[in-house]
Amino acid sequence: MTSWNSRIYQVDNTMDLLSVARAFLDSWEPQELALLPENARPQRLKGIDDIHYWHQRLVDSYIQIRLSDDEREKVREMLHFFAFAVQRSAELDVKPPVTDHDATVRLFSDRSVPKLFTSAMTGARDR
């Protein structure tokens, strides 16, 4: 059986990461979920931002709420998964660097150059 961390690491886009996170939540029995504090019990995951949201809720409850040993263990287990998922989502969201040429093309496109220079030379009355 592939570990959840391995499954997270193998995804190559955020939609697949979201699918893995949903499968992880589906693997929990209701009795296990009941051990999590209600305000840190992940519900449906509609988007990748929900992974970040529930990660923070789990961190807050782990730090701030007095938990039994069983509850603490379940929060830790859930938190471990969400921490790794948040890390992977950040890796997947990395944008390729913009080269100097690309930046110049974006700044001075065919549409922007005439508009920028025309408005500067003619003033606000011609807008």
Image (cartoon, helix red, strand yellow):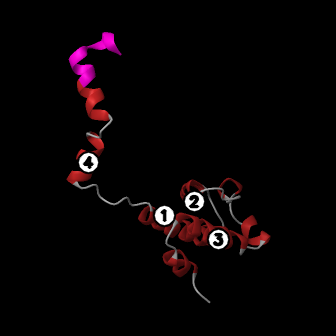
The disc at residue 103 is 4
Could you give the CA–CA distance between mark 1 and mark 4, rounded to whole angstroms? 26 Å
Q: Residue at position x 30%, y 44% from top?
A: 106
Which of label 4 and label 3 is nearer to you?
A: 4
Picture quarter with the N terminus: bottom right
* Amino acid identity at mark 3: Lys
* Callout 1 secondary element: helix
* Callout 2 secondary element: helix
Front residue of 29/100: it is 100
Which of label 2 and label 4 is nearer to you?
A: 4
Tell how many labels.
4
* Crowd rating for badge 3 (residues with CA inside 10 Å; few <14, some 14–19, many 20+): some
Please, what is the dominant secondary structure of the magenta stretch?
helix
* Callout 4 secondary element: helix
Q: Which residues are magenta?
A: 118-127
The disc at residue 89 is 1
Q: Quadrant of residue 2?
A: bottom right
Would you name the residue on which mark 2 appears? 51
Q: Position of residue 96 (x, y in %)?
A: 33, 60
Q: Residue at position x 73%, y 67% from top?
A: 33
Front residue of 2/70: it is 2
Q: Position of residue 9 (x, y in %)?
A: 49, 76
| 116 vs 37: above or below | above
Work out whether mark 1 precedes mark 4 in sequence or the reverse, and give the earlier one: 1
Would you name the residue on which mark 3 appears? 74
* Crowd rating for badge 2 (residues with CA inside 10 Å; few <14, some 14–19, many 20+): many
* Amino acid identity at mark 2: Ile
Q: Residue at position x 27%, y 20% from top?
A: 119
